Image (tube, rainbow, N blue to C red):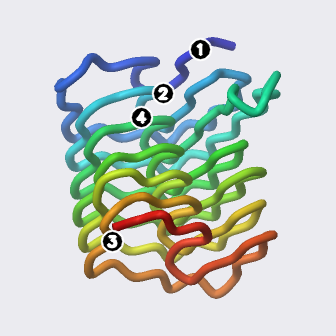
Amino acid sequence: YGVFVGGIAGKNGEQRTILNCKNSGTISSTGYRVGGIVGEGSIFDFCENSGSITNNYLAQSSMDSSFVGGIAGTSGNIMNSINTGHVDGEIAGGLAGSISAARKSINDGSVKGALYAGGIGGVCSNYIVTSINKGSLEGGNVGGICGYSTAFIITSLSYTEKSNGLTTGGIVAINKGK
């Protein structure tokens, strides 16, 4: 148990880069931010997760959501990274539960999010460029790239063959994006 839980570190400082990291261990937590590499972090480059990441945090209110991802629970920028592990939680993304930006990254793991599930991010806020989802998706609001998005999504693809959710979209379930 912890607020920030990760295979490498719980939390990484602002504008700090995590480079060439790999997690293959299973993580099961009741933390607020849970990720295969870091629970909460800023910049990731050439990172890989193949471990199963599960967050069993129970929200106390609608403003008290938890985030879980193959690379990070919440993140700034994820580049040149891949997740092949299973991700399961309230707001779940193949790369990050909440992500600002992704470039040249891939999710090939299954993602299950009770509220939002996305192949790249459960919630996406800035931009997603040249990224791919191949993993199956399941949950409340399910999108091939993002469950909920206010982001630009450019030249990104989802090849998922299975997606099951209350609201389902090939790229985004709920789009408030640009």
Residue where numbered disc 3 is placed? 153
User: Mark 4 and mark 1: span between their CA atoms?
Assistant: 15 Å
Mark 4 or mark 1: whose residue is earlier in sequence: 1
Element at badge 3? Answer: strand
- In the foreground, 116 or 134: 116
Whether pointer 1 and pointer 2 mark residues with C-beta atoms closer than 8 Å, the reply is yes
* Quadrant of res 124: bottom left
Mark 3 or mark 4: whose residue is earlier in sequence: 4
Q: Which quadrant holds the C terminus?
A: bottom left
Q: Nearer the viewer, mark 1 or mark 3?
A: 3
Picture coordinates of residue 43, whole percent (x, y): 23, 37
Identified by mark 2, the residue type is Gly
Tag of residue 3: 1
Q: Is residue 155 left or right of residue 90?
A: left
In the image, residue 133 sits, relative to residue 14, either above or below, namely below
In the image, residue 44 sits, relative to residue 102, either above or below, namely above
Tag of residue 37: 4
User: Mark 1 and mark 2: span between their CA atoms?
Assistant: 8 Å
Dot 2: within a 10 Å radius of its alpha carbon, few (fewer than 14), some, or many (20 or more) residues? many
Q: Which quadrant holds the N terminus?
A: top right
Picture coordinates of residue 164, whole percent (x, y): 77, 75
